[in-house]
Image (cartoon, rainbow, N blue to C red):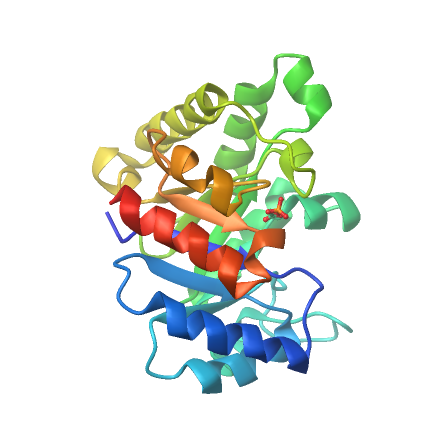
Amino acid sequence: MPRKLAAGNWKMHGASAELAEIRDLLGRIGDTGCEVLICPPATLIDRMHALSKGSPLALGGQDCHMAQSGAHTGDISAAMLKDAGASYVIVGHSERRANHGETDAVVRAKASAAHSQGLTAIICLGETLEERDAGDTLGVVEQQLVNSLPDGVDGTNTVIAYEPVWAIGTGRTPTLDQIAEVHDHLRAQLQSELGAETADDIRLLYGGSVKPGNAAEIFAVSNVDGALVGGASLKAADFGGIIEALAAAG
Ligand code: PGA
């Protein structure tokens, strides 16, 4: 199993002034034993890469196009992210699925594009509140997982992030039992798709209102191998607290 992963998704936040947060973060992460990733706006990857050279901080994009180049105004390719210094890219975040109509097939093609450039794809999935209330959570995430996974997936090139849509940016989180139920189900599904050896190497992140105050209890849940963190990753002090909790979870 690759090292546990604390991933920060800055979304559409951050400009030059926020490079100070990265300097602060670099001072905190030292030798934590877990992997630390920031996915800033694409405009900052290059400068963060220069700042973090020689440090354990990894950088990632928040999305990529399924093609490596072409007439796609406003889009960014996996090759460009890699060139700027990224080693990861988030695909299929629920904000992309909702705001840009991204289907599982699109997410799968984007993950495949990421792999072709040697980037690790963080494939996001999760149910809406209506789907949870209807008792459909496990069926929904299973479908998203099966339909979003490209060929050739392994623990090096792919991470799965379970992010209930209703928990993102709301301050609400599922109960620990609910998180365990979904993560155990995703692990079992990966095992049946890929075989136990490959499946057990794939990190399963929880995302949605993770904060320093709830991180330790979430990291103690079975099959939780880290977190994908939005709001609380913007401040080095908060993200540092989450990283410490992950390191302590062992
Ligand atoms: P949040 O976002 O931590 O602000 O809830 C998580 C995410 O969207 O990845």
Query: Quick one: 140 or 21, which is closer to the camera?
Result: 21
Q: For the C terminus, give its image quadrant.
A: top left
**Residue at image location 63% in from the left, 64% down from the top:** 65
Query: Quick one: 77 or 177, which is closer to the camera?
Result: 177
Q: Residue furthest top?
A: 135
Where is 92 relative to 177, above or below?
below
Determine the image quadrant of residue 204.
top left
**Residue at image location 54% in from the left, 50% down from the top:** 229
Question: Residue 219 location, x and y as percent?
Answer: 37, 38
Q: Relative to 129, is 53 on the left or the right? A: left
Question: Residue 2 location, x and y as percent?
Answer: 26, 52
Determine the image quadrant of residue 119.
bottom left
Where is 32 relative to 124, above or below?
below
Q: Residue furthest left?
A: 197
Q: Relative to 17, is 151 on the left or the right? A: left
Query: Quick one: 137 or 26, which is closer to the camera?
Result: 26
Determine the image quadrant of residue 57.
bottom left
Where is 137 relative to 72, above or below?
above
**Residue at image location 62% in from the left, 61% down from the top:** 10
Question: Residue 182 location, x and y as percent?
Answer: 46, 25
**Residue at image location 63% in from the left, 75% down from the top:** 18
Question: Residue 195 location, x and y as percent?
Answer: 26, 34
Count of marks placed on residues: 0
Tell me if residue 150 can be seen. no
Tell me if residue 187 can be seen. yes
Q: Relative to 8, is 29 on the left or the right? A: left
